[in-house]
Image: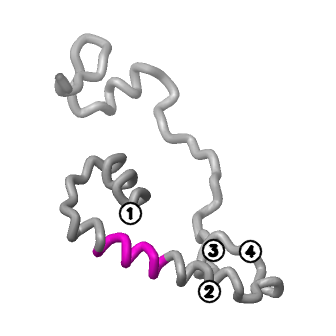
Amino acid sequence: MFDVKHIAKLARLGLSAQELAKIQKELSSIFDFFKELEQVDVSDVKPTSHAYFLENIVREDVAKKQLPKTVAQLVKSAPETKNRYVKVKPIL
């Protein structure tokens, strides 16, 4: 019972005596199941990081020319400008 009280305290849970007893039984059965799992032979099982064998399908990372050559062309292509600058909406 002490372990459950300690865990509940760490998790900042206010549990009644009945709730503590119920959780104690549930945790005990979970730990018993883990003990059963420890006895399973997994020596032939390869370690995996994911249950599904997925592969990323992405396009090649190819550098392309995106911006105009000069600042003047960039400013000219902007939707709004002020003097020689691209005008954007304030974010604050």
Q: Position of residue 58 (x, y in %)?
A: 58, 65
Give the residue drawn at x 36%, y 46%. 10
Secondary structure found at label 3: loop
Q: Are marks 2 and 3 in contact (CB under 8 Å)?
A: no
**Neighbours of disc 3 within 10 Å: few (<14), some (14-19), many (20+):** few
Q: Secondary structure at mark 2?
A: helix
Viewer-nearest of discs 1 and 2: 1
Q: CA distance from mark 4 to mark 1?
A: 36 Å
Q: Taking 40 as reference, is 90 left or right?
A: left
Kindly report which numbered mark, 3 or 4, lies closer to the viewer in this rendering: 4
Which badge, 1 or 2, is on the more N-terminal residue? 1
Q: Quadrant of residue 37?
A: bottom right
Q: Which residues are magenta?
A: 22-30
Q: CA distance from mark 2 to mark 4?
A: 20 Å
Q: Which residue is mark 2?
A: 36
* Vertical order, 32 against 15 (above or below): below
User: Which residue does the numbered mark 1 point to in the structure image?
Assistant: 1
Task: Tell me the distance, in whole angstroms, between the alpha carbons under discs 1 and 2.
Answer: 22 Å
Mark positioned earlier in the residue sequence (3 or 4): 4
Alpha-carbon span between mark 3 and mark 4: 17 Å
Q: Amino acid at mark 1?
A: Met
**In this view, the mark in front (2 or 4):** 2
Quadrant position of residue 22 = bottom left
Q: Earlier in the sequence, mark 4 or mark 1?
A: 1
**Residue 83 sits above or below residue 10 on the image:** above
Residue at mark 3: 55
Asked which secondary structure carries label 4, the reply is loop
> Which residue ends up furthest to the top in the rendered image?
83
Name the residue carrying label 4.
Answer: 47
Q: Identify which amino acid the numbered label 2 is placed on.
A: Glu
Q: Callout 3, which amino acid? A: Glu
Whichever of labels 2 and 3 marks the residue nearer the N terminus, that label is 2
